[in-house]
Image (tube, rainbow, N blue to C red):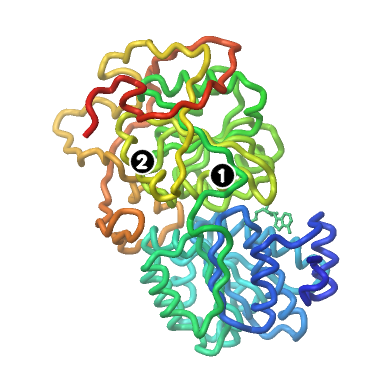
């Protein structure tokens, strides 16, 4: 089906054509007609499916047909990276229209954002925290809202933004069109759609929360202390030319980046300790090929829309399968092919099995050829991914075993704070997520390295459990 049969405005079709897209993706073909019919919509689509254009193109088409009257479309997304990404999309598709766009997110001055609201930008793209700060007392600026988009709603739920979103929605006109996008459809997500949407159409692309089919996945079973060496070993291959590495913590991200830089591999980091400018610079350098590896934490990496990522490496395996799906969706975008490699140590065994059960698909185990798996672990207080020694009198929270440190990561969104506990449906069997605060001084630590140069990484796929393969001993 060509784009022109979808009923979009001619100026938008021209911009789409200039972007180089030849035909709509499935989510676009399915969602755009409903949006143009002014229906509420639930879009269940994974990252990389073209969902941003699926809501942006019809919204622009509707807005282009009538004169500006203040803010008419409000897009709410979980992170500032995603907001910036959506803004870039909107600007590209609206380049032949005279619509105005503004972004609202924390960590930068409020003043220009307030000014944009007061001047009535046609389209406002915002993170929930800062938006809630700014919308209070300025409800009038939103009185003519025609569209509300909640993007990556599952992630906003994860990040504890639902109370803020509820408050925002209360301040908006009831008569509006609401578009709700999520990679997964859990019971909690369904409940939210009941709250915010009216007689919605549902468009679901692919199986629920299954990783993108264009990404080939593999697992490397590896003890924690050998991970740095294995990453360097794999990076000897040219085919890993644009690599996004995920770590659990920002300090872990910094450590890996330092190690790779020491080995002469141009590397950037993106996490919540980096300023907005630093993050955008790293993203741009990655996009332009000035750095080969970008090391990121989950939340900071939301919304990374960089074409051509050849490999996603889960240096730390994500405890929740939603995160796995989002991570690997950074490669294999649109119709490109990508590879996702996961480093899996003994502690991750349960999470890998849970993921395999969830996706109803086994992930092949690989062994890195030519890599020395026998190097001993370094002494306890050196190397590896350990915390620095305890200082006299220091009281520490227990280290989270299989949980992400949300207290640190959530600051990625900005200055606003929300209550963050949530219960998980499909991901965690209704468990309460706890927040714990680890400590690290971020100083470099010695990391034991091992591995040989120049051999192929793609060993034969291997069936069987992680414990058996690495000789970790009995399974639980
Ligand atoms: P998204 O799912 O919105 O993050 O989009 C994923 C990627 O697909 C982005 O790099 C878009 O630029 C790209 N994209 C969106 N629509 C199309 C299309 N119709 N054809 C090819 N690529 C597209």
Q: Are marks 2 and 1 in contact (CB under 8 Å)?
A: no
Residue 110 can be seen in this image: no
- Indicate left or right for 441 with 116 as reference: left
Q: Is mark 2 within 8 Å of ligand 1?
A: no
State which quarter of the image contains the N terminus.
bottom right
Pointer 1 residue: 279
Residue matched to label 2: 353
Residue 369 screen position, x and y as percent:
52, 15
- Which mark is in front, 2 or 1? 2
Location of ligand 1 given as a quarter of the image = bottom right
Q: Gap in Å between the C-alphas at discs 2 and 1?
A: 33 Å
392 over 263 or under it: above or below? below
Tell which of 242 and 91 is nearer to you: 242
The residue that appears at 64% across and 33% down in the rendered structure is 242
Percent x, y of residue 84: 61, 57
Label 1 secondary element: helix
Q: Which mark is residue 99?
A: none
The total of numbered circles placed on residues is: 2
Mark 1 surroundings within 10 Å by alpha-carbon count, few (fewer than 14), some (14 through 19), many (20 or more)? many
Image position, residue 335 (x, y; %): 69, 49
Give the mark nearest the N terminus, 2 or 1: 1
What secondary structure is marked by label 2?
Answer: helix
Vertical placement of 2 versus 294: above or below?
below
Residue name at image x 56 percent, y 66 percent: 204
**Image location (x, y in percent) of residue 385:** 35, 27
Residue displayed at 40% across by 19% down: 226
């Amino acid at each position: 089906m060509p784009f022109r049969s979808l009923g979009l405005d001619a100026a938008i079709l021209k911009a789409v054509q200039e972007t180089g897209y030849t035909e709509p993706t499935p989510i676009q073909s399915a969602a755009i007609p409903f949006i143009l019919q002014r229906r509420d919509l639930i879009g269940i689509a994974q990252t990389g499916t073209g969902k941003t254009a699926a809501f942006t193109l019809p919204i622009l088409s509707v807005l282009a047909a009538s004169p500006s009257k203040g803010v008419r479309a409000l897009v709410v997304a979980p992170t500032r990276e995603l907001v910036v990404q959506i803004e870039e999309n909107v600007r590209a598709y609206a380049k032949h229209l005279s619509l105005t766009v503004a972004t609202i997110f924390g960590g930068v001055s409020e003043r220009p954002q307030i000014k944009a609201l007061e001047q009535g930008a046609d389209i406002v793209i915002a993170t929930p925290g800062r938006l809630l700060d700014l919308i209070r007392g300025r409800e009038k600026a939103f009185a003519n809202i025609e569209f509300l988009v909640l993007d990556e709603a599952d992630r906003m739920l994860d990040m504890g933004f639902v109370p803020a979103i509820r408050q925002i929605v209360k301040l908006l006109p009831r008569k509006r069109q609401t578009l709700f996008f999520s990679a997964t459809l859990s019971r909690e997500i369904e409940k939210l759609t009941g709250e915010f949407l009216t007689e919605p159409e549902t468009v679901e692309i692919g199986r629920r929360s299954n990783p993108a089919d264009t990404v080939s996945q593999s697992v490397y079973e590896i003890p924690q202390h050998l991970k740095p060496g294995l990453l360097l070993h794999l990076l000897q291959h040219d085919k890993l030319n644009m690599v996004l590495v995920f770590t659990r913590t920002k300090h872990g991200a910094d450590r890996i980046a330092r190690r790779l830089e020491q080995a002469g591999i141009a590397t950037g980091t993106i996490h919540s300790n980096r300023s907005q400018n630093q993050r955008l610079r790293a993203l741009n350098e990655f996009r332009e090929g000035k750095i080969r590896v970008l090391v990121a934490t989950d939340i900071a990496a939301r919304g990374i829309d960089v074409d051509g990522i050849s490999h996603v490496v889960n240096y730390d395996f994500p405890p929740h399968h939603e995160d796995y799906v989002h991570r690997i969706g950074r490669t294999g975008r649109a119709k490109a092919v990508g590879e996702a490699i996961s480093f899996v140590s003994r502690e991750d065994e349960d999470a890998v099995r849970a993921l395999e059960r969830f996706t109803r698909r086994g992930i092949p185990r690989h062994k890195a050829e030519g890599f020395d798996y026998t190097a001993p672990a370094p002494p306890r207080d050196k190397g590896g991914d350990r915390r620095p020694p305890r200082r006299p009198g220091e009281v520490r929270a227990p280290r989270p075993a299989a949980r992400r440190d949300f207290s640190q990561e959530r600051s990625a969104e900005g200055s606003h704070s929300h209550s963050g506990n949530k219960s998980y449906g499909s991901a965690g069997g209704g468990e309460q997520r706890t927040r714990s605060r680890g400590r690290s001084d971020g100083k470099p630590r010695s990391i034991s390295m091992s591995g040989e140069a120049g051999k192929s990484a793609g060993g034969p796929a291997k069936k069987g459990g992680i414990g058996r393969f690495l000789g970790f001993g009995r399974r639980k």
